[in-house]
Image: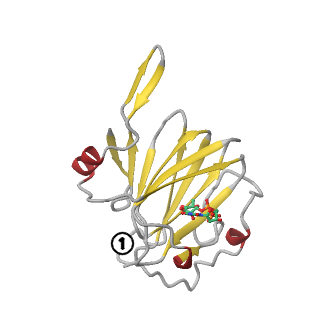
């Protein structure tokens, strides 16, 4: 397992060790002991989620407000996404900055997204299956959404006229946004 710094505090790209042989491959998708030893982060995940999307879907940019904010460990087991986060932590020099990385079934990379980020992804292939671990339970009353294509971020999602949920179509603008995250 290799940890790659992203330039954003505690936002970590994780490259798992893949054991290939004539049958296929094996990897540990999560190992609490190794995760804590390599990242120095004491995170307890309590909920696993999975979504399936066709190509040209955008889900995001979502977060849960404190005290229900979630750390997430996200990965793709089928297909490909451009995974995108925006730093909402007011004390960070990367506040308001976005980070994007392609996660797919070939690279098997994971992204650890700490509390304080809005998170989303665009699907680059049909039948994209997205799995992620959360450190806090789903709390719909605490959910919030920032407009996926807010001009403040100038994100190249690598999709055009994507399929969005009604909720995501009504994401808030970042202009005038007051972050709940220190
Ligand atoms: C997130 C969630 C949703 N649901 C139910 C609520 C809806 O009836 C249905 C679809 O929910 P939603 O449209 O919010 O799903 P996504 O758009 O994939 O939301 C996720 O997308 C981005 C990428 C994220 O990072 C968040 O974890 C999460 O907000 O699943 C649950 O029952 N539990 C849950 O934890």
Q: What colour scheme was applied to this rendering of the protein?
A: secondary structure
Name the one closer to the observer, 126 or 9: 126
Image quadrant of residue 105?
top right
Element on which disc 1 rests: loop
* Crowd tier of the residue under label 1, counting other residues whose Cα lies within 10 Å: few below 14, some 14–19, many 20 or above: few
Q: Is residue 87 above or below residue 104?
A: below
**Image spot of residue 114 (x, y percent):** 39, 63
- In the image, what residue occupies the spot 45% across and 73% down? 88
Image quadrant of residue 30?
top left
Q: Kindly give the residue lying farthest to the right in the view shown.
A: 161
**Image spot of residue 136 (x, y percent):** 42, 66
Q: In the image, ligand 1 is in what quadrant?
A: bottom right
Q: Is residue 39 left or right of residue 105?
A: left
- In the image, what residue occupies the spot 48% across and 17% down? 23
**Image spot of residue 55 (x, y percent):** 71, 46
Circle 1 residue: 92
Q: Is residue 164 left or right of residue 121?
A: right
Name the one closer to the observer, 88 or 66: 66
Q: Is residue 152 above or below residue 135?
A: below
Q: Can you say which quadrant of the picture contains the N terminus?
A: top left
Name the one closer to the observer, 26 or 163: 26
- In the image, what residue occupies the spot 54% across and 57% down? 84
């Amino acid at each position: 397992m290799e940890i790659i710094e992203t330039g954003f505090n505690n936002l970590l790209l994780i490259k798992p060790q893949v054991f290939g042989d004539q049958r296929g491959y094996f990897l540990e998708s999560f190992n609490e002991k190794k995760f804590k030893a390599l990242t120095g982060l004491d995170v307890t995940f309590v909920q696993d989620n999975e979504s399936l999307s066709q190509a040209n879907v955008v889900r995001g940019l979502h977060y849960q407000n404190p005290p229900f904010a979630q750390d997430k460990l996200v990965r793709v087991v089928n297909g490909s996404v451009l995974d995108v986060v925006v730093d909402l932590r007011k004390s960070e020099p990367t506040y308001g900055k976005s980070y994007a990385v392609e996660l797919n079934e070939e690279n098997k990379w994971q992204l650890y997204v700490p509390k304080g980020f809005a998170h989303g992804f665009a699907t680059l292939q049909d039948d994209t299956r997205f799995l992620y671990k959360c450190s806090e339970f789903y709390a719909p009353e605490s959910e919030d959404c920032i407009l996926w294509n807010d001009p403040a971020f100038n994100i190249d999602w690598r999709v055009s006229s994507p399929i969005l949920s009604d909720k995501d179509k009504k994401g808030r603008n970042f202009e005038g946004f007051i972050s709940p995250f220190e």
